[in-house]
Image (cartoon, helix red, strand yellow):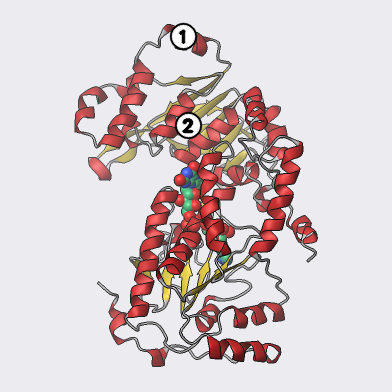
């Protein structure tokens, strides 16, 4: 069903195009006269959602022009800054995104932060439609005492650090402790645990076959890591874990490392497996097998020689981060013991009143990502952390759309993001066809470039990115890596001659 306002909305209420600044008048006029049949669309964010939305629009409308605005100097969002550096195959989607960016009807404008350098109303004036695909960049706070202690990090920042996100390069985690605790039991938690526990020689092997783009600085710190045990803590039980079987299997098979699972946590689960949906059934079977079955001789020998370990700690909720005696860093975490109440989706963890202190020198909170509003003119549901929308149409704002994590919340893989971005693209094109978007010409990037220039903002193009890309690949060859990521924006701008 279309939002209520869709019926009464009409071109006459669309804000009028502001006259462009004098020095761009000529190009604006040329644009104006030649682009009448051309829908000008802009997408905010160049992660999977932004690129898949652009791909759909360009494929299904032969005239549409799509401009992608991105706040970083480089494209691809979490594919570059989130996906684990030892999962190069996942990053192959970059090839498809690159093809989209090479379309002569698509342009990438990096180094432009929407909400700061240009506002959403300004974009709406310049384009026929605007799609917000800016992801979920914040992390959920733990909201417990001691969270601010040195040695406590969000998994988001830790991931950004090893993946070369410029804003996280100062993180410098101290890995001289024996034990780390990760709060949360999703795929990001397992990624972080795997990176922390991968033996240095295995990291070297990944380097040799160019299967990692982990940053040099992170690799240096991880080589010196003293972390031997990682606890992955969840408020609920084995049936509620949010990670998937592929990531679990990788952990179980991690060289030099053994799993610690308490068989008691799995009591009674065998009987319930039959009723479970297939993915949950397979996941639970693997957990159960690892926790309760005797390993074969070869596997037993491998486990016996393992020098590192990881464990799943169920029914524990973080209550307080405990300081070292001098109060200068984390020394442990107090966990409230929980039990489950309710059934199915409504299952909740409630405290039993018991607590447990777990000594550790590092706490990483991986309890979720979160979107934030980027412009006061855009409706935002602070509770759900999403832009309220109906199949990608922003509720009560005609001509404004959203896709990806900011549309449906920070869950799901790249494939899920692809499907929901295609759906948003489809809705936009339906509205265009139905005459629900402004019919007159729009100046598109011409007007926005003039605005940015008047504000001293210098965007970077996709061919600029390709120069940086070539530089990264060349630097990586020296150290046997697929690339050595550039992490300093000033250096990147210098390399581009900006
Ligand atoms: P993002 O990828 O976050 O893209 C949003 C983009 O918007 C970013 O480039 C950001 O810089 C930009 N932006 C933000 N604010 C602004 C602004 N104001 N102005 C302009 N631009 C802005 N999925 C898999 O399938 N396989 C995996 O192995 C995998 N690993 C993951 C690991 C981690 C740590 C995380 C967090 C996620 C992982 N995912 C994985 C999930 C996948 O990354 C997401 O499904 C997907 O990236 C969501 O796409 P998005 O475009 O909505 O958000």
Secondary structure, mark 2, is strand
Query: In which quarter of the view is residue 289 placed?
Result: top left
Closest to the observer, 326 or 99: 99
Q: From what the image shows, is residue 147 above or below residue 122?
A: above
The circle on residue 298 is: 1
Closest to the observer, 311 or 124: 124
Image location of residue 135, percent across then percent down: 49, 58
Image location of residue 41, percent across then percent down: 49, 75
Question: Left of 135 or right of it: where is 164?
Answer: right
Visible residue check, residue 170 = no
In the rendered picture of this protein, how many numbered marks are placed on residues?
2
Image location of residue 152, percent across then percent down: 60, 40
Visible residue check, residue 160 = yes
Distance in Å between CA atoms under marks 1 and 2: 26 Å
Closest to the observer, 203 or 341: 203
Question: Which residue matches tag 2?
Answer: 232
Query: In which quarter of the view is residue 421 placed?
Result: bottom left
Quarter containing the C terminus: bottom right
The residue depicted at 59 percent of the width and 27 percent of the height is 198
The residue depicted at 70 percent of the width and 73 percent of the height is 457
Q: Which residue occupies the extreme top position in the image? A: 297
Quarter containing the N terminus: bottom left
Q: From what the image shows, is residue 389 above or below residue 277?
A: below
The residue depicted at 34 percent of the width and 86 percent of the height is 9
Q: Residues within 10 Å of mark 1 (few under 14, many from 20)?
A: few
């Amino acid at each position: 069903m279309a939002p209520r306002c869709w019926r009464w909305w009409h071109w006459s209420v669309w804000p009028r195009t502001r006259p462009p600044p004098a020095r761009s008048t000529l190009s604006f006029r040329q644009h104006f006269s030649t682009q009448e049949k051309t829908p000008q669309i802009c997408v905010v964010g160049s992660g999977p959602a932004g690129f898949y939305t652009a791909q759909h629009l360009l494929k299904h409308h032969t005239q549409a022009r799509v401009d992608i605005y991105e706040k970083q100097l480089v494209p691809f969002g979490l594919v570059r800054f989130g996906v684990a550096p030892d999962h190069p195959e996942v990053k192959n989607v970059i090839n498809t995104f690159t093809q989209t960016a090479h379309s002569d009807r698509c342009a990438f404008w990096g180094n432009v932060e929407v909400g700061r350098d240009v506002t959403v109303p300004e974009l709406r004036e310049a384009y026929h439609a605007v799609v917000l695909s800016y992801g979920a960049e914040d992390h959920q706070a733990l909201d417990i005492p001691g969270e601010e202690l040195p040695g406590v990090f969000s998994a988001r920042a830790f991931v950004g650090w090893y993946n070369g996100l410029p804003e996280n390069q100062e993180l410098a985690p101290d890995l001289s402790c024996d034990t780390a605790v990760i709060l949360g039991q999703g795929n990001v938690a397992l990624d972080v645990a795997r990176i922390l526990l991968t033996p240095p020689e295995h990291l070297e092997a990944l380097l040799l076959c160019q299967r990692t783009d982990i940053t040099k600085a992170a690799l240096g710190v991880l080589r010196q890591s003293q972390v031997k045990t990682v606890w992955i803590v969840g408020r609920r039980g084995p049936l509620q874990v949010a990670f998937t079987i592929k990531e679990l299997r990788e952990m179980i098979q991690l060289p030099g490392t053994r799993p610690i699972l308490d068989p008691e946590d799995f009591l009674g689960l065998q009987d319930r497996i039959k009723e479970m949906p297939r993915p949950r059934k397979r996941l639970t079977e693997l957990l159960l097998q690892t926790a309760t079955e005797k390993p074969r001789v070869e596997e037993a020998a491998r486990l016996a020689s393992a020098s590192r370990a990881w464990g799943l700690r169920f029914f524990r909720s973080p209550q307080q981060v405990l300081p070292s005696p001098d109060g200068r860093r984390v020394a442990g975490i107090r966990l409230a013991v929980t039990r489950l109440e309710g059934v199915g989706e409504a299952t909740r963890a409630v405290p039993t009143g018991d607590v447990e202190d777990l000594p550790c020198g590092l706490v990483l909170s991986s309890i979720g990502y979160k979107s934030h509003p980027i412009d006061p003119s855009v409706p935002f549901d602070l509770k759900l952390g999403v832009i309220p929308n109906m199949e990608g149409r922003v509720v009560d704002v005609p001509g404004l759309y959203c896709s990806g994590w900011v549309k449906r919340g920070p869950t799901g893989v790249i494939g899920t993001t692809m499907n929901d971005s295609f759906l948003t693209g489809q809705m936009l094109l339906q509205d265009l066809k139905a005459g629900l978007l402004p019919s007159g010409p729009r100046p598109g990037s011409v007007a926005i470039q003039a605005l940015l220039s008047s504000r001293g903002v210098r965007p970077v193009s996709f061919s600029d990115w390709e120069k940086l890309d070539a530089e990264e690949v060349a630097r990586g060859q020296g150290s046997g890596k697929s690339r050595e990521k550039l992490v300093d924006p000033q250096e990147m701008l210098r390399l581009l001659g900006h």
